[in-house]
Amino acid sequence: MAKRYSSLADYFERSGESRASAAARWNVTEATISRWIAGTRQPDAEQMLQISADTGVPVEALVRTAAGEVA
């Protein structure tokens, strides 16, 4: 069973993956990832699906973070 994480912040903290490697995989900047985590920007729908598949973070958590709610 794949690991599940409650948020992107949780994923980076517990998985040990760097934001730099994730940014390269998702073709975004590290600053973009920081904005997603902070909730000031959100990935588009296609990105959310890819991030969820890559990390085990539920899409619902990515949407909540994007809406400014604590995931």
Image (cartoon, helix red, strand yellow):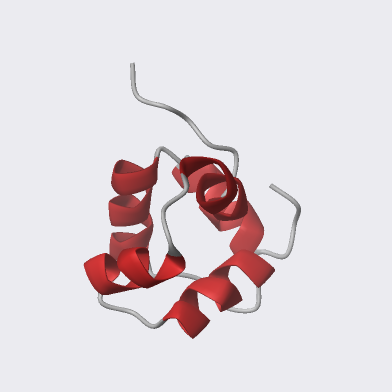
The vertical placement of 39 against 71, above or below, is below
Q: Which residue is drawn at 43% across and 62% down?
A: 18
Position of 64 compared to 44: left or right?
A: right
- Please state the horizontal and vertical placement of residue 20, each as a whole percent of the image: 38, 72
The vertical placement of 12 against 26, above or below, is above
Q: In which quarter of the image is the N terminus?
A: top left
- Please state the horizontal and vertical placement of residue 55, each as a whole percent of the image: 38, 44
- Please state the horizontal and vertical placement of residue 59, each as a whole percent of the image: 46, 46
The vertical placement of 14 against 31, above or below, is above
**Quadrant of res 45:** bottom left
Q: Which of 63 and 29 is in front in this view?
A: 29
Q: Residue at x 41, y 53 (%)?
A: 17
Q: Which residue is drawn at 25% across and 76% down?
A: 27
Q: Nearer the viewer, residue 46 or 28?
A: 28
Position of 44 compared to 68: left or right?
A: left
**Quadrant of res 37:** bottom right
